[in-house]
Amino acid sequence: MSGDGAAPGDAEENLRPLRTDLRPIVEAVREADAGAFVAVGDRFDDDLRYLTRFSGPDRPYALVVVPDDENADHAGRAVLCAPALFGEQAEREFVAAARDADAEPTDDAGAGPTDDADVEFHDGVAREVRTEGVGDHAGERAAGVVDDLADGANAAAEGDGPTVLAPASIPHDAAVYLERADNDLTSTDAVADARARKTPAEADRLRRVQRAAVAGMARAEAVLAESGVTDTTAEKSERGRRPPLRWEGEPLTTERLRREVNQVLAARGVRDAGNTVIGAGPSAADLHYVGDDPIRPGETVLLDVSPRGPDGYYGDVTRTFVVDGDGGWERRAYVAVEAAREAALAEIEPGVPAKTVHGEAAAELAAYGFDPNADEGEAGFTHGTGHGVGVSLHEGPSLSGAGELRPGHVVTVEPGVYDPEIGGVRLEDLVLVTDDGYEILAVYPFGIVPSERD
Amino acid sequence: MSGDGAAPGDAEENLRPLRTDLRPIVEAVREADAGAFVAVGDRFDDDLRYLTRFSGPDRPYALVVVPDDENADHAGRAVLCAPALFGEQAEREFVAAARDADAEPTDDAGAGPTDDADVEFHDGVAREVRTEGVGDHAGERAAGVVDDLADGANAAAEGDGPTVLAPASIPHDAAVYLERADNDLTSTDAVADARARKTPAEADRLRRVQRAAVAGMARAEAVLAESGVTDTTAEKSERGRRPPLRWEGEPLTTERLRREVNQVLAARGVRDAGNTVIGAGPSAADLHYVGDDPIRPGETVLLDVSPRGPDGYYGDVTRTFVVDGDGGWERRAYVAVEAAREAALAEIEPGVPAKTVHGEAAAELAAYGFDPNADEGEAGFTHGTGHGVGVSLHEGPSLSGAGELRPGHVVTVEPGVYDPEIGGVRLEDLVLVTDDGYEILAVYPFGIVPSERD
């Protein structure tokens, strides 16, 4: 944002400045007795997005982070090798934004994974952009920067380059460039660990995008509430599927409903990111359904809205509705899932093993007679209770995985039950683990019968 | 699409069925005397999206393609190793969609890179989904399928696995799994070559998303046409920047305008994909500006709209407007860019070296007094004249690169001139190279003064 033209609704939000503390990466390099950390990828690589805040090109670029033992003011140096034509953008997003963040007072200096509040984030790691020539390979550029800057003291023998930490999924051609320069590659969890615990500035952005997501949900619920049932009581008693709902004079379909939701997201300045999953009837049992189905009375309509905000953070909310239901399977499923949600939330606080949360949700669903360990395509609970959300829609921690919940974790809580013949019910919120419990990032009401929300 | 609830506006479009001919990949394996082709990536990997049509998960999955010499009905076999919980979606998008495509008559059988119209696309390569367990690594799964299916006859020695063709940027950990299974990796251009030449079914989708893009542009142009100038003639004569335009009672900014465009895209069922670049004044000279600036009279407003359609294909259109201009730099720039556009289009037909198109545009801009080889941040023409567009926003062919134009290439034509102190003018259309020239995929009018379009 610049100038006097703040976007509507953003000015009053007062988002804390966003910058990534690169010192944990420097520390990981030191601890591994390596010379550098290297990441190579394009704008779709979320590790790079997190580390650099560079919204970047759709071709590969590189980040190199090295410790700096010779300069008392800096823990290390970070060099972004930007493609030609992206130098200005890289300077703006990687360097100037970090500098601007320093200029503003903020209360989050000690809240990230590193608690050293004396060292300024920006000055903690000196940042620099080097622009590649057209046709340069990002891996080759990275190898050159490592050769230029990294301390080779840990090299095993004369002439060898230092060991390089890199994400395991670094592009193979980039890895080959580094290996040809005599760097040994070692994978690291440092980036995933840093990403899992959100700073207050990251939580601000997750709240903002989640508020947009629930605004989209409210639009969908209003459309369902406005939709009309055209069949008669006589038709309802038949076993066949009922005629679709009608809205604004046309049959209501999952695609029409999706477009309504996505327009609200666009008006709020976030992108649907292709993630507005809407299923109706049997397609509600399909976890990733983005096709076009008629929406019929009496059947579950499952909406899972996961937009991406301008800083790259995702929201994630799911609700399930039934228009003119008869109180059968879907009502039992809804009550069970609500109970599972309560049971899961009741466990969330720092120090709790993550898989306890899933275990409690599953036990509750089992108590209501649903199979808590169903396979895909079977009836029951077919997935985990939740996952981390950040600059990736799915990241750590998993509520079915190892480890304990810690303050700053942001996870979905999303129990659900499905029957491939009938439909599905899932209820999902996004919660931030706080020092003494949790915060629901954007509260949205429950209810199987859709109604107009203000 | 399924059922009786077609999305508004899609039903009458009659899109030809989309399926990817995997035989060129089988042929590349044979020609390289390799045993298999392997790709590993997530939903953001456009090669995999093209090859499988699987809209996929945000974690890695794998595709393995092997020749099949033992079955006269098939050229080869293709196995998609889908993550747990994505088996149904993979069956639907990778197998059933290809089968459905066969069932419908189509005129594009001979139009793809392969001209063998006797072999049905689906039956040309037998398709299969294998679902991974939770925690399986896609690279390990791919290595297992290669071991299971690939012909080891070309192995260099007993016990060796066959050579495997793979994209150069395959994730390094996947490459290591394959190499540990004694497969040598060799990179291939086969996927990029296949992607560059579009089938009629792909052109249908590019036309559809480009129509949505120009609808978004029309909305932006209408907003600009409706916007009011608040300063007086006396103020206009000053050298300082003028107060922003006002629209619907508030200052108009690039972010407000972007949200208007993106709502139209959402209503049309396409995603803005974070690609609605709008600059105003000096930020119009910044090629990838997505920030928030006030829009002032007399300054260039550059809009570059590149949405992504539901099948993954991108559109790409740029126009530049000035509200209440004074006929200075921006008018000269507009005339020059229009002339460069005409000069570039006049060259487009099969057999023409791609770089001729860029050369003609650059020469025209030079004739108008603009530097045709400016570097980023300098005044003049700072980029190439165009690039291919498909399931990636930037793919082959480049209009500055080697090679000749061929029927089925889809390229942008986008000359532009910039002055970092003033602004920028760019005009961009998306064109399909036809047998005897080109087709503009969605025609949109020109004019530096914004007006309401119907």
Image (cartoon, coloured by chain):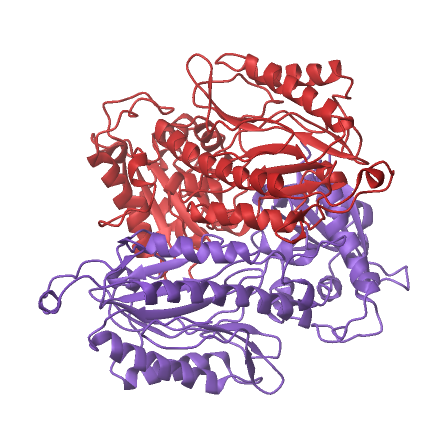
Chain colours: A red, B purple
On screen, residue B155 versus residue B437, left or right, reads: right
Q: Position of residue A424 (x, y in %)?
A: 72, 33
For image coordinates 48% across by 67% down, the residue present is B214
* Residue B300: % across, % down: 28, 67
At which x and y percent is residue A172? 55, 48
Residue B91 percent across, percent down from the top left: 77, 47
Looking at the image, residue B366 lies above or below residue A157: below
Using residue A292 as the reference point, say whether residue A50 is left or right of it: left
Q: Nearer the viewer, residue B192 or A372?
A: A372
The N terminus of chain B lies in quadrant: bottom right
Residue drawn at point x = 36 percent, y = 39 percent: A65
Q: Is residue B160 visible?
A: no
Residue B206, relative to residue B46: is it above or below?
Answer: below
The relative height of residue B143 versus residue B68 in the rendered view (above or below) is above
Snapshot quadrant of residue B167: bottom right
Please state if B221 lies on the left or on the right of B424 as rendered: right
Horizontal side, residue A239 vs residue B349: left or right: right
Image quadrant of residue B382?
bottom left
Q: How many marks?
A: 0
Q: Is residue B144 above or below residue B449?
A: above
Quadrant of residue A232 in the image?
Answer: top right
Near-viewer residue (B110 or A158): B110
Which residue is at the front of the view, A346 or A43?
A346
